[in-house]
Amino acid sequence: MELAAFLALAVLALGRLPALGRGGAGTLSELALLTGAGALFMVGTVVPLAVVDGWLGGTNVVNLVRNVLATVAIWFMTMTAKNMANGSRPARRSIWGLIIVIIAFTIPFFLMDRGVTNAEFIRVNAGSGWLWLYASIYMAFVAYMMVRLFQALGERAPRPYAVVRIGAILMCIASIAEIVYLTARVLGRQSEWLGDLFVPLFYGGILLIAGGLAWFPLARRARHAALAIANAMLRRASAPHPALVGDADRHSAETIAHGTYRLAVQLADIGNAVELTRTERWSLRFATHLLNLQVPAPHVIRMSAVPEAAL
């Protein structure tokens, strides 16, 4: 599951590299994808864990680097959601909070006896008080950020946001379960079944969040392609009526959505002056339906000239 999550984030990050220069939610989400992919790389999904940790000294420092990158990725993810919800930018207080949390769990990490590289580093050292403090601070911050992510998307209607919120719930549950598991181990109680919940819940949540966020750029491209098709259809439909069509050169700089809307209104007006052919009526209704799904304003287009029965 870690490999699937890494591939999902890596592919999304590569596909959205141009978003780094756009600012706002685009830049924040791309930074979240890049740091998230970096964190999953540290799990040993691509290069063996022993090799990656060997680069860092072979004392499980890779675990700390992974958690630092994951913390930053989750922070960027939450800031992305807040930006999409209300246009806000990361506050200075939030940035300082992120730095303080990273420092807070880094200190106990270096105070504990870490041993040599071990893929089961957390399980092996679960009875250590220092490890409990290290992992609990990290997991508590993840849970807190997932709650904030859930709240930030609370008023957003599109279905992909619901998928992101479900992913946030899973990651929050995974983080709380991990804290409870580590606490039980420190108290001398065995609860391995609780520790086993972490991987499927946590990485399952990452996949859902990545999938939900991936929907938006893909949907944007599909929407642009559909509008381009509708635009071409309306231009062809308007061509037989040059006397009733305005000067198109004035609109050369308009967006595809605005241009398609203008052409739809134009063809609807033509339909009030002359009878449209069946193909022209179909083109107009297709374009109007597409616009009404995506742009609120085109609801003003009056389709009285194109009765359903005529189609």
Image (cartoon, grey):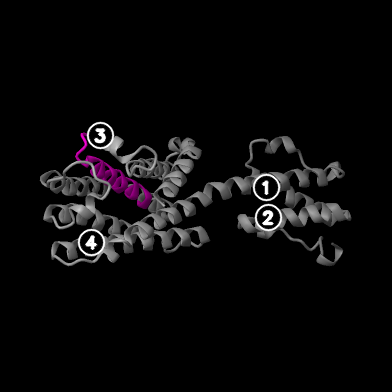
Nearest the eye: 112 or 215: 112
Q: Is 143 drawn above or below residue 92 in the view shown? A: below
Which residue is painted at 70% across and 58% down in the image? 289
As displayed, is residue 52 above or below residue 267?
A: above
Whole-percent x and y of residue 140? 24, 58
Do callouts 1 and 4 mark residues in contact (Cβ within 8 Å)? no
Image side of residue 239 versus residue 48, left or right: right
Tell which circle, 4 or 3, labels the residue nearer the N-terminal end.
3
What is the number of the mark on residue 290? 2
Distance of label 3 from label 1 (alpha carbons)? 52 Å
* N-terminal label among 1 and 2: 1
Report, in whole angstroms, how far the alpha carbon at label 1 lies from the one at label 2: 8 Å
Residue 158 in view of the camera: no
Residue depicted at 42% across the width and 40% down the height: 23
Q: Earlier in the sequence, mark 2 or mark 4?
A: 4
Residue drawn at point x = 23 percent, y = 63 percent: 181
**Amino acid on which disc 4 is placed:** Ile
Type of amino acid under label 2: Leu
Q: Which residue is mark 1?
A: 227
Q: Secondary structure at mark 1?
A: helix
Disc 3 marks a residue whose amino acid type is Gly
